[in-house]
Amino acid sequence: MKQLLLLALPVLLFMSCKKTSFIVYNTKADIYFDNHMIRNFDFIYYSTKGYSFGNKPDVTEDSIPLTVKITGGIASTDRPFVLAVNQDSSGAVAGRDYTLPDNSKLIIPRDSITATFYVKVHRSAALLDKPATLVLKLMPNTFFDTLITEQKESIYNNIILNAVSFKITIDDIIPKPGYWKNYINFLGAYSQQKYLILLKVNGLSLTDDIGKLSKTYFKEIATKMQQYLHQQAAAGNIIREKDGSLMVMGPDVR
């Protein structure tokens, strides 16, 4: 088992007054995921990524970039690599929750040691109930091995990441607004379904920042929501929570 601590990329140059020549390596290289961010001047590597549609009401699909890197040197031709789904660890459904790039796009380009590809994520109805997990893994082929299986998160800690596996978690969950707990006597117990109806009834959107508005304002929007629930019930449309219980607002506006 190999651990990736520091990648050295020796490129030997033979220089003359007429031209510069490059040594191109012909030995089989290793391929691994190389996704990182810079924090406090340090490279922080990561092997998981979460994506939420929750606060993106108008977005139905998006693309997540992932980068791979190889050891060794460059080549004079494109080199394909193999990406697979770890079915034992993945609950996401291909075509419904995600789409992988065509195999023709999974290449290390000539004269390069890195490549970036894109995983398309879809806003499926299933994501409203629970998140979906997609675990990708790099596979060996005639061009690349996958012997570098470990990578340190940072030179400043000993957290070890899987260098040939990457996990994406997709959801459509709207986090409970921070102000909800301050006005629970008006708003009642939180649910995503109630929150979305509350916004619609009051002509609001997910992007409206109402957290700093007055107590009187929250009483008004909660009262209007409770009136809407009563009107719907009177018309024979009883609105319930996902667990079947009656949707109600807080005790101070009932």
Image (cartoon, rainbow, N blue to C red):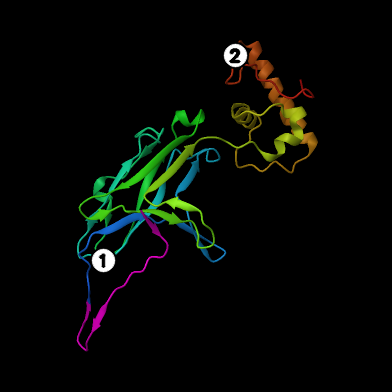
Nearer to me, 33 or 127 = 33
Q: Earlier in the sequence, mark 2 or mark 1?
A: 1
Per the image, the residue denoted by label 2 is: 237
Residue at the spot 61% in from the left edge and 10% down from the top edge: 236
- Number of marks in picture: 2
User: Would residue 94 be found to the left or right of residue 132 on screen?
Assistant: left
Determine whether the residue tagged by mark 2 lies in a helix, strand or loop.
Answer: loop
Q: Position of residue 38 (x, y in %)?
A: 51, 61
Residue 55 part of the magenta segment: no
Query: In the image as oriented, which residue stretches furthest toward the bottom?
Result: 17
Determine whether the residue tagged by mark 1 lies in a helix, strand or loop.
Answer: loop
- The amino acid beneath tag 2 is Asn
Residue at the spot 39% in from the left edge and 41% down from the top edge: 135
Neighbourhood count class around disc 2 (C-alpha, 10 Å): few under 14, some 14–19, many 20 upward: few
Residue 4 visible in the shown view = yes
Q: Position of residue 137 (x, y in %)?
A: 35, 45
Residue 122 visible in the shown view = no
Q: Does the magenta stretch mainly form a helix, a strand or a loop?
A: loop
Q: Which residues are magenta?
A: 1-21
For residue 121, which numbered disc appears in the image? Answer: none
Residue 187: name its quadrant.
top right
Per the image, the residue denoted by label 1 is: 74
